Amino acid sequence: MRINKARQVSAVLAVGALALTAACSSGGASGGGSGSDSGKKATVTNFGVGTKADSTGPAPAVDGAKNGGTAYSLDQAGFDYLDPGQQYVSDQLSVQLLYNRSLTGYKIDPKTGKTIIVGDLATDSGTPSDGSKTWTYTLKDGVKFEDGTPITSKDIKYGIERLFADYETQGPQYVQKWLYGPDYRKQYTGPYDGKEIPNEKISTPDDKTIVFHFLAPHADTPYAMAMPNISPVPKAKDDKQKYNNHPVSSGPYKIESYQPGKSLTFVRNTNWDPKTDPIRNAYPDKWQFQLGIAEPGLTNRLSADTGTDKYAINMSGSADPSKMQTLTSDPQYKSRTVNEYQPYVEVFNLNTKRIKDPKVRQALAYAFPMTQVQQAFGGGAQGDLGTTLLSPTVAGWKKFDPFGKLAKPMGDPEKSLQLLKDAGVTTPYKISLAYANTPRWDTVTLTIQKALEKAGFKVERKAIDPTSYYTVVGKVDTPYDMYRTGWGADWPNGSTVVPPTLDGRNLQDGTNNYSFLNDPKVNSEIDRINQITDLPQQAAAWEQLSEYVLQTDTSQIPFIFDKYFNLYGSGLGGVTYNQVYGTINPNSIFVKQ
């Protein structure tokens, strides 16, 4: 997921601090870093595509679970969007699972964490044809809106059509672009003038069938269909922007009351049939969200574990960094702690338009002080040392450490000096290091400056207003050599990481290729891999290409695998984690009776 979109909340916080919706971990399965202060080891989830049988409800029962009770979620902020068409941020991705069903979704084994993509409203993950350009989905029997109206293929199509309206600006754009190309809004402007997407793009031959005809092959279509915006919207209930306050439920809960920024309450949707749903157990009778709770008060409430907070969780936000030492060292919290990978990789981009010699960029990679930066981020429980461009939450991920960073995580100045010498550098190489002008990033970049200056560089730090940070570093003529960004996969495939961040044909202001890499081999490989229709083969190819870029082009220095770290109330059971979203999975939670 795009950290400046899919995890916009995380991104904004991460510029000024470490993303509070992202904590980082121990070595564990990643093989990296100092041990997690939590005493736990992160897991690398197995991902895959489920069968039609896997797509059949009800969801597997959770040991010890019973129906009933009220579960609570404590949140720092409110929800900018409840309209599924606008949802692309971690807190929204987690809450929408309670009331919104997409064509597909993620089925998570509560014991092993294995995550597979299955049919949610659809009977399976999709049937490809025409070389994976065409995908057909059949809706299940018995799926209904909260008023009992059957959900049809036309409701799915209408939900997609409204994504083209000018006010729908915040959600994913994969399906829209796959149908029409990058300038999709110029070709179709939504359903409000009476026009529909033509049958040659999306057809609904009957109430149960919807067929997508894309411009190019897309093997990972089953994952795109799990995004919250590929969901049904009843045309009669669509009042455009106002729909955001009362989205019609297709899931196990419906909105009882909503006070933006203060509270959000869900009660059971009696027209949801668990036999149609392989993903959601929906054990609590009610969910109450308390919004606008400032830190460190929120973390203090979860740690105190009193009153209704015994039944509370923060589904998308990590614990306050100031409380980490206590939370990770006191054994009383261990049994109700979640510490798992999120889909983000924190990197420092190296501007390839300015630092043109790969040897100089590799010298920076060797010199980079990973351990010191990890500690500035809050220590082992707030950051696992990351040495790959793909996160461990991406299918096909492998350990890869071409610069020996895990062996010398404090930096290797001798190797850096040798590379600079090989590059013909006879005086300290000048680097402009840009950072968001906050106390946290002032400290982090001072640490980096000291390490790089021991390794043959002369570093000039440049502070940027945090509110315009991404705009400044995303300009093709940005005057800076080195600057931090982050990126997260939208789903567990490198297709949502490598093309957007490494394609050299994506070089204009606002690009997500922040290093401005333009390697013809990488560009051609992106085109080749996009044509692969076997998903595991494609995932392996993305992983291999990411290794090539890291080792050969060295346009980015990965340094942290982000993680979620937080507590939950002792009165909750069945707490599992969704590594794709990087949030708690509410589907399996139950209230202990």
Image (spheres, grey):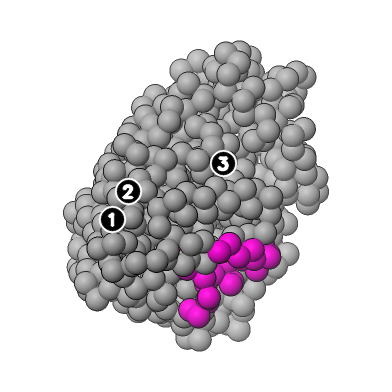
Q: Which residue is mark 2?
A: 414
* Measured Cα–Cα span from mark 1 to mark 3: 29 Å
Mark closer to the observer (1, 3)? 1
Q: Residue at x 48, y 65 (%)?
A: 431
Query: Is 9 located above or below residue 180 in the figure?
Result: above
Query: Is 367 located above or below residue 506 in the figure?
Result: above
Q: Residue at x 58, y 72 (%)?
A: 472
Say what secondary structure mark 2 lies in.
helix
Check whether the beta carbons of the residues at disc 2 and disc 1 lie within 8 A of each other. yes
Q: Is residue 235 magenta?
A: no
Residue segment shown in magenta: 460-482
* Measured Cα–Cα span from mark 3 to mark 2: 26 Å
Say what secondary structure mark 1 lies in.
helix
| Numbered tag placed on residue 391 in the rendering | none
Q: Nearer the viewer, residue 23 or 43?
A: 23
Q: Which residue is mark 3?
A: 377
Q: Amino acid at mark 2?
A: Glu
Q: Which residue is mark 1?
A: 418
Q: Amino acid at mark 3?
A: Phe
Note whether residue 376 is visible.
yes
Q: Amino acid at mark 1?
A: Gln
**Toward which corner of the image does residue 84 lie, by quadrant?**
bottom right
Q: Indicate the position of residue 93 as horizontal and vertical percent values.
A: 55, 49
Q: Nearer the viewer, residue 361 or 399?
A: 361
Say what secondary structure mark 3 lies in.
loop
Q: How many numbered discs?
A: 3
